[in-house]
Amino acid sequence: MSLDLTNCKKCGRAFMSDGNVHCKRCRDDSEDEYRIVKEYVYDHPGATILEVHEATEVPEKRILQYLREGRLEIVDDTNFVLDCQRCGTSIKSGKYCEKCSHEMAMELRSAITPKKKEAPAKPDETKKSHRMHVDVTRKKQ
């Protein structure tokens, strides 16, 4: 794996990227924010995104990102803020509802699994062209 010199999408600092778009410092900051949000939600189950934002000062957009990534989950059955990106059904976390996730997994499996080839047709054994024959007749001795 090669390291490329790139600029961090968040702070603009140059860093050696191993595939990440954020530098180590920004990734660490993001993880710290996640820990703060996680602890607040643990202590205050059922809190709304706005309440979490006001208490932790973590941007609402980032909290929604944690929900989309499946790192947080909404526990209140009436407090759906996310929609399935495929069918639009309300969901508690992630990007897709259970039904769509299952359907997409099945579609992927069927696309990856090699299709069974049809058995080759058996040659028609009654045709003369498929029988063995000798062009020259034998002479009796």
Image: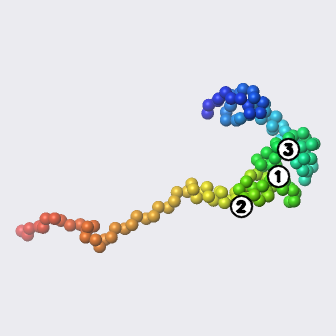
Which is more N-terminal, label 1 or label 3?
Answer: 3
Give the residue drawn at x 75%, y 58%: 88
Numbered badge on residue 73: 1
Crowding around mark 1 (Cα neighbors within 10 Å: few <14, some 14 to 19, many 20+) is some
**CA–CA distance in space, label 3 to label 1:** 15 Å
- Which quadrant would the C terminus be assigned to in this image? bottom left
Q: Position of residue 94 (x, y in %)?
A: 76, 51
Q: Position of residue 3 (x, y in %)?
A: 64, 29
Numbered badge on residue 99: 2
Residue type at mark 2 is: Lys
Q: Position of residue 120 (x, y in %)?
A: 40, 64
Placement of 126 over or under 112, stated as above or below: below
Closer to the camera in the image, 17 or 54: 54
Q: Are marks 3 and 2 in contact (CB under 8 Å)?
A: no
Which corner quadrant of the image does residue 62 belong to? top right
Residue type at mark 3 is: Glu
**CA–CA distance in space, label 3 to label 2:** 27 Å
- Residue bearing mark 3: 60
Residue type at mark 1 is: Glu
